[in-house]
Image (spheres, grey):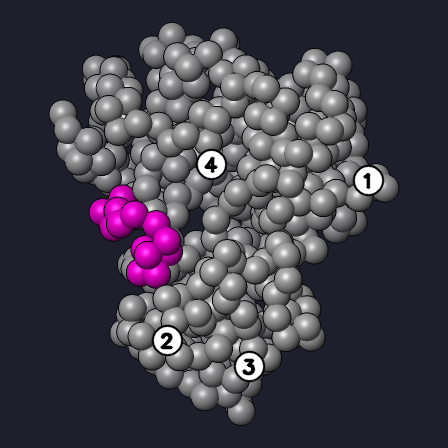
Amino acid sequence: MTYSEAIQFLYGLRLFGAKFGLDNTIKLAALAGNPQDKLRFIHVAGTNGKGSTCAMLEAIYRAAGLRVGLFTSPHLVSFRERIQVNRQLVPESDVVRLLENLQPSFQQFAADHHPTFFEVVTVMALSYFAEQKCDLVVWETGLGGRLDATNIVTPLASVITNIALDHQQWLGDTLEKIALEKAGIIKPGVPVITATDAPEALAVIERVAANVNSPLTRSVALSRAAATSLPGDHQRINAALASATVEVLQKQIPVVEEKIRAGLAKVDWPGRLQLVGRKNGRAVLLDGAHNVAGATVLVDALKRIRAHRELGDPLSPSDGARVTAKITLILGIFQDKDWQHICDVLAPLAETILTVPVSSDRSADPAALAAECRRANPGAKLVTCSSLGEALEKTSEDGFTVVTGSLYLVGEALELLGHSPAAKSERALNEWAVGQKL
């Protein structure tokens, strides 16, 4: 099997959708020798900020000298982004080997219970981290938590970033229902750390933690000034959460204050308020705001940017690109997201808005996005484009362009702007479908 053939095989696993439940993953991991039993984990769930918090935890523990595995999703460009050790992507040859090792196990499953893409990748990651003798694995949930494939591990700590409305069709239509799914990663006696501040969601987390005697720490109550290389005030909340987690685990994994600061100062997590410069010096801001809460965070950042007319450290790119007060918005969103409200939040801040399709069958219609943006901001110039490439070309001379609405769109932008190696066939691996509610 070649790497390309391995990717095609994984692509074929999407046909099995995304099934909720742990039975398949438990069985597949057992057939692989239960690699999770050889590892220590920090399990991270939440609506927004999971990836950034994971990146911060990884950076802190790596700065402290540990060998750290990092498991996240979705990937922006390359599938290999999902499985990293000390921020080195899993090599192509290991992707092939890990998949080939698992393939004979698939015969142990009935046709209607074949392991899904995410279940297979979860066990591939566990096997790789065990082989690499990782001292710690920072382990991000896929969707939800309670019935997510990642939930077969018993971690050192369970971390819940926040709770907001997203994936309501699968996780529930209230903050309480969503919180209950996220709180499903809480294990008996295992400490819980959260930055959740929505009272109805926090009440659920508190109840679940109390029921299983898990000590709960609220990072929002801490006074630590958390400085991080990732831009945006919301990242300070994530940094405080990561720092609180490290403090809770000091007895198991001691980390001195200097290493915590050093790790947070060097975090790298693309696609979140990431400012890149074009060859002509114009600035493009990439942010994967894919729900209303994420869009609100982006608007807060844009208001701050507009007030100062330019971005100072840590947002300024190395090529010195600067921004103007006028904002051009390139927007592409999934149909199954709350795209109307995302448009309502983002559109009022832009003078020019270009709507584009996301490279996915789940994409919302750019014309429908444009109509909603026009309603939210009648004074804006509206342009409907057939592709992101067209939109980037039309805005090449604009002073400050924001690309947002989907991490898939951000991944494509990184490719088109020359800030990531092309791997178009691998971005489609992020596609999934769920055939049932939790």
C-alpha separation, residue under disc 3 versus residue under disc 4: 34 Å
Q: Does residue 292 appear to the left or right of 429 in the view shown?
A: right
Mark 1, mark 4: which one is toward the viewer?
Answer: 1
Q: Secondary structure at mark 2?
A: loop
Would you identify the image quadrant in which residue 279 lies? bottom left
C-alpha separation, residue under disc 1 versus residue under disc 4: 26 Å
Q: Which residue is mark 4?
A: 72
Which of the two discs, 1 and 2, labels the residue nearer the N terminus?
Answer: 1
C-alpha separation, residue under disc 3 versus residue under disc 2: 14 Å
Q: Residue at x 50, y 87 (%)?
A: 380
Would you identify the image quadrant in which residue 228 lies? top right
Which of the two discs, 2 and 4, labels the residue nearer the N terminus?
Answer: 4
Q: Does residue 98 appear to the left or right of 316 in the view shown?
A: left
C-alpha separation, residue under disc 3 versus residue under disc 1: 35 Å
| Magenta stretch holds residue 156 | no
Q: Circles 3 and 1: CB distance less than 8 Å?
A: no
Q: Which residue is mark 1?
A: 224
Q: Which residue is mark 3?
A: 326
Residue 138 vs residue 86, the one in the foreground = 86
Q: Callout 4, which amino acid? A: Thr
Q: Look at the image and give the residue range highlighted in magenta.
A: 414-426
Q: Is residue 433 visible in this depiction of the protein?
A: no
Q: Is residue 90 above or below residue 411?
A: above
Q: Which mark is residue 396?
A: 2
Provide residue 343's location: percent of width, then percent of height.
52, 73
Q: Residue at x 40, y 79 (%)?
A: 397
